[in-house]
Amino acid sequence: MVTSSSPNSFRTGPDERGHFGIFGGRYVAETLMPLILELETAYNAAKADPAFQDELDYLLEHYAGRPSPLYYAKRLTEQLGGAKIYLKRDELNHTGSHKINNVLGQVLMAKRMGKTRVIAETGAGQHGVATATACALFDIPCVVFMGSVDVERQSPNVFRMKMLGAEVRPVTAGSSTLKDAMNEALRDWVATCENTFYCIGTVAGPHPYPAMVRDFQCVIGNETRQQMMKAEGRLPDTLVACIGGGSNAMGLFHPFLDDKGIRIIGVEAAGHGIETGEHAASLSGGRPGVLHGNRTYLLQDKEGQITEAHSISAGLDYPGIGPEHSWLKEMGRVEYASATDNEALEAFALLCKLEGIIPALESSHALAHVMKLAPTLPKDNLLVMNLSGRGDKDVPQVAARMGMKIES
Amino acid sequence: MSRIAKRFAQLKADQRAGLVTYITAGDPDVDISYQILKGLPAAGADLIELGMPFTDPMADGPSIQLAGQRALKAGMTIDKTFDMVRRFRKETGDNDTPILLMGYYNLVYQRGADKFCKDAAAAGVDGFILVDLPPEEADELKPFAEANGLDTVLLTAPTTDDKRLPAVLKYSSGFVYFVSVLGITGTRSATEEAVQTHVARIRRHTKLPIGVGFGIRTPDQAAAVARHADAAVVGTAIIDRVKAGLDDKGKAKPDLVPGVFAYIRALAEGVRGVRKA
């Protein structure tokens, strides 16, 4: 099942059936198949339509606030004493994470396709907030499915979504986290597909979602190329990003996949530790399987029952990963590492202290790996870490973890 | 000729439609589930769908989701599901009633499509209905199913238009399953007119028998479907009878199994009351 020789380019996938090697595909109920084919056709047309890209570019610049800065983190660099660390500041985007990049693209697609209702799943609530935001902007009714466990631990985002006019539907099935929210969104979509657009938040799901979401997120890597050329006169040496489904990572990585000298590392959530079995690291602790419309690495038991992921970060708490990451792992082009809950919390605290930036718990996983990696690299190694989200939403949870009460 | 084809030929000779009953294997436990399976033909089931419980049943409503959770909690596995079928063939001597496994593709994929088909055929299974394996991906399974004499029943939906139907039919054998409503199992019901229109449309493309399911809850609804289709498929409403037979602790009350059979007999009467030319 492992693909053999290295291709000339790592950037040409997927094939016309939506496969990246053996990964990806369209494993969905027949009711949805015609809709997915319609989306593929519509997306191909949009890609070829300069007016679509112009409108998206305008929104990214004037509404979301792009380009996001590429910031040289001097104090962090000095503290770690190795690689020169740059943070790609996607946490400064409107709504506080990279999710808005994709959502603006998809909501424009929904409009283009004449859909009158948008649904989304969310884990940490960042994608839900972004979707609720874009739907407010375009005056489209929006329903966000969120596991009831996540509703609890990311309450600030639940409130934000409601303020923005979205309906938040807590999901109590299964483990009541992101995978269950996605199941419920798919169930809604099967019943409402004639008027509803499903805005998937990551580079997963049936084709064309993994490719489409990746394309919308590639603005991160494309900007990074230009910004690094301007800052240092050359491309970076090392890229690091956290991975749940993997959209912020794919957005940073993809434009650099064919630059052979660049070391690229995705960081999964190791929860209590891979060895404990309580983690969300599909690539390190899972194997290929079929769920949510695609074949990819999944956490599952011997028979193929999906096992529950664990991570302190609701956005990484998912037993799967985007299929293109599975392929890149098997091709050996991207390295995949992991960071535990505790390592992420340490990283969270460090960035607050040294740089005055409160990172999302998701992005803190990437930083936790940077803390291990940077000291081993030479000082002229240019390292870019995607700071994919801000941590305001995590403050109540981190405070509780530290035994502190938030009081006014 | 496969058991499924034979059964539909017999139904045609009898000038009536068939009743297809769905139960989740292992719900509420392996023993009760087997008791139900064993008695289905006598209660009036012409074909049997045996659901393979899965943690993430994306196309199912709350009833079948919970049935799957009960079964998994009771320790249901694929091997035990095969055992149920093997035991059914051996103990009842019923070598005519087709049994189809219904569920999600990952369970097949993890065993390996080849081995899964071999094991299923050896146990006495007749075919598959895999919700998340549309024609676009069906070539992963089809050659192994064919090699082992197993039918692949693909789903068609109201959204499957005339242009797309041939692609679905290309991978279909045994019968065609028409999902009569947009939505998950057990939520809404189609009108008789809608069923009539879609069945007529599908018939223009195929000679395969057509089974219609989703949203059939009463003998009258089953009869209405039987007037147009070759079989009516009932799932959620049966699962609801199983659930109604559980006590507060989730244990089967004595009237669970008889209650399920009484309900199926009523459905069968509805279906059998319709004479077909």
Image: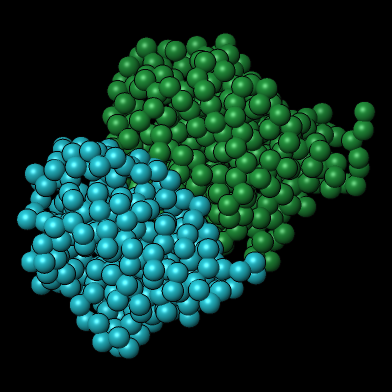
Chain colours: A green, B cyan
Image x and y of residue B212, in percent: 26, 52
Of A194 and B94, the residue lying toward us: B94
Image label count: 0
Residue drawn 8% across the image and 66% down it: B13
Of B1 and B201, the residue lying toward us: B201
Residue drawn 85% across the image and 45% down it: A400
Query: In what quadrant of the picture does the N terminus of chain A appear?
Result: bottom left
Image x and y of residue A357, in percent: 78, 30
Q: Is residue A211 visible?
A: no
Whether residue A38 is situated above or below residue B76 in the rendered picture: above
Residue B123 lies in quadrant: bottom left
Image x and y of residue A208, in percent: 36, 37
Whether residue A408 is situated above or below residue B185 in the rendered picture: above
Query: In what quadrant of the picture does the C terminus of chain A appear?
Result: top right
Residue B235 lies in quadrant: bottom left
Residue drawn 62% across the image and 41% down it: A170
Q: Is residue A140 visible?
A: yes
Of A28 and B111, the residue lying toward us: A28
Residue drawn 59% across the image and 26% down it: A166
Question: In the image, is B205 to the left or to the right of B111?
Answer: left
Of A243 and B48, the residue lying toward us: B48
Question: In the image, is A32 to the left or to the right of B203?
Answer: right
Image x and y of residue B23, in percent: 40, 66
